[in-house]
Image (cartoon, rainbow, N blue to C red):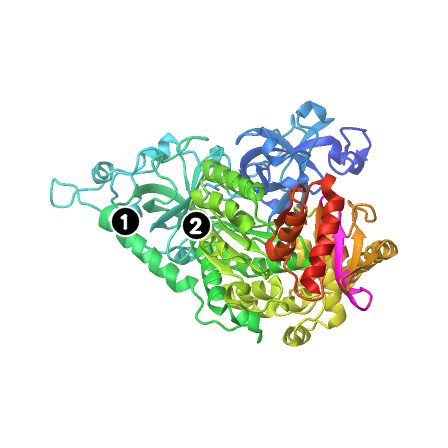
Amino acid sequence: MGNCIICGIPVDGEICESHEEDVVFEFHGNAASQLTPSRYYRGTVDGYADFGVFVDVGDHVTGLLHRSELDQRLESLDWEPGDEVFVQVLDVRDNGNVDLGWSIRQREREFRGQLIETADDEFRPEEFGDGADAPSDSETEPGTDGDDEAEDDAVSEEEASKEPSPDAGTTTEAVAGGSGSVSTETAAASTPAADSDEPEEEPALNRTTIDAIDDQVGTVVRLEGEIVGVRQTSGPTVFELRDETGTVECAAFEEAGVRAYPAVDVDDVVALEGEVERHHGDLQVETETLDVLDGEDADAVTDRLENAIEREARPAEISLLAEHDAVAAVESEVGNAATAIRRAVVEARPIVVRHAATADGYVAGAAIERAVLPLIREKHTREDAEYHYFERRPLDGRVYGMDAATDDVTTMLEARDRHGEQLPLVVLVDAGSTVESVDGYDLLSLYDAEALVVDDSRADEEIVDAVTTAVAPSLSGADVSDLTSTALAANVAAHINEDVREDVEHLPAVSYWVNAPEAYLELAKEAGYDETAISERREAVALEAYYQSYKDKRELVADLLFDDEDGRPRDGDLAAHVSEQFRAKLETELETARENVETEDVDGVSVAVLDTGAFTHRYNFPTTTLLLDALHRRREEGTAVTLGIGDDELYARATDSLDVRELGEAIADAAPNAGVSVVGGADGHVEYLPGERDAVREAALEALGETLA
């Protein structure tokens, strides 16, 4: 029993519960489970990723400070690897991942006290080490973690002077810059002579594969493959090595924060020898030698990798989820898209999924995500790989314009330069199939970054040459009136990863607001989702897609859409609760809209016109497009078209197929000074100058009369 260092009341330890957040702790434990959620800790910046900052909390635990927890943009942080920072532990997950929170206090003196936390106790700094037992070497995990401090990695002079292990074999001289490399001359000198004055060479190590090293912890192994990532920590340099069976991190130490093997970079074909170790559940190789291969040696490794990738990436066969003519029209493209995505996983390239911030976009993107994440976990030894190698980034609209492309290029170049990552595969879902996106694809192609499209829109031919694969049935002349992007994406997902086929079979039905094909409804029913469950999930996703539409909301969307761990549909309380909010908000806006709709008779065609600038809440749910969709679905009998005319945008919803591009061209001819342009192709919308709004309104009605009469 002691007294709280802040208020002095008797406590079991050094701090009372009400003052835990007033002190900063220095962690001297050896496992994430020994941290105390809600406490603030001193940490060290380890490195950056697209989604946040990795912070070492003590010497043996690394946590993630997600960008959503920051009080500023991630790009504006001036932290460098090795900088001391202060963070709050929000949660320690069952798998050992640590979620960190931002601390507005970034100086020690801003806290009211300091304490040291060990595996099972806490101490005042002046008492620690004097009667207090710090973790012994036997209590901590041996060797070097790629994210640990330099003190765990440094090679002492005594260790460096030891004779090399017989297991290490004789190696050629390693590329300059890495410790632990043993030259042929040194190895020979340390080997006892047999019956000759000449030193006897030790036998070279046989090559092993990454999928086999799980049973070789503590053994020195030889690996051959391609470097797919390099990052510099405050301690070692961490190389990510890929062979034909998987990917593993290999730590090499020169000195704290100094690049080991500076001549080795991403895409180099190498031979690496080192000891296999396990840290925090992750396999890791302690690099002893690292050589860049060339000539026939490099060619042999490259051929081995390419053959393995080709065998593994392409699906064995194409078997669509259900009979659907529009999807069947792009059966080969479904296979090509699945192959491209699987190939990116095998090659350890990041995958970025860009999708519209709509219910269809989110569900389609989630289908791809559901298929890819297990493959990433399988291929990479680090537990947080799924956050490094896969990301969904919702789009504002359905065009992959220069703004989004510039953001992606900036992010990928920063990741390449700062963290040694490869260039990503960019997957456009429910977006990006019209000519307005070509400039964005061209920017990606200047850096040799691949892109592919999965979209139900009426696509433009220009897209075919701009992307690697276009899964767009309209390009094959298919009728896409009964198609959603999710119906396409779920089929792609089922061929990316056959193990998730049953997980995604109900998703196409979720994506249809009306007239879902019977085959998809039957699949959902077989999966345990009745019409109410389907409707609630669609509405819940639509509402959540609106809030913070630029975020992926990975876990929330997964909870809404997928079964629990036992394979049963999740308790519908979450979806039911959110969908109830959806309906309440939508009905309120619909009531206002109906009261202000004007009906125009244009050459015998009934057109419902809503002034969306005056009679909608622009910054409240639902969005203009979602409101007009619902308004048109509930239109008065005989109404052929619903027009939403805002200050500078016009949206049209029609009972029969309507080509918005043709409509835009007709409006431009009738109102030449209105600066008319069409965004999103035949299924898009019209933009114009606010001062010409009235002229655009009249031109639109006249054009509709001529088109639909």
Q: Which residues are magenta?
A: 632-648
Q: Position of residue 195 (x, y in %)?
A: 12, 45
CA neighbours of label 1 inside 10 A, class few (<14), some (14 to 19), many (20+): some
Q: Position of residue 84 (x, y in %)?
A: 59, 29
Q: Is residue 318 left or right of residue 522?
A: left
CA neighbours of label 2 inside 10 A, class few (<14), some (14 to 19), many (20+): many
Kindly identify which residue carries mark 2.
Answer: 248
Residue drawn where x is 37% and y is 42% of the image: 287
Asked which quadrant contains residue 673, the reply is top right
Dot 1 or dot 2: first in sequence order is 2
Q: Quadrant of the C terminus?
A: bottom right
Asked which quadrant contains residue 108, the reply is top right
Amino acid of disc 2: Val
Assess whether residue 639 is covered by the magenta stretch: yes
Asked which quadrant contains residue 177, the reply is top left
Q: Position of residue 584 (x, y in %)?
A: 84, 57
Query: For the residue labelled by badge 2, is the local secondary structure a helix, a strand or a loop?
Result: strand
Q: In the figure, 327 relative to 114: above or below?
A: below
- Number of numbered callouts drawn: 2
Q: Is residue 383 visible?
A: no
Q: Position of residue 558 (x, y in %)?
A: 66, 58
Which mark is on residue 645?
none
Q: Residue furthest left?
A: 196
- Which residue is nearer to you in this view: 619 or 111? 619
Kindly identify which residue carries mark 1.
Answer: 298
Query: For the residue labelled by badge 1, is the local secondary structure a helix, a strand or a loop?
Result: helix
- Which residue is nearer to you in this view: 517 or 577? 517
Assess whether residue 135 is covered by the magenta stretch: no
Q: Quadrant of the N terminus?
A: top right
Q: Is residue 337 visible?
A: yes
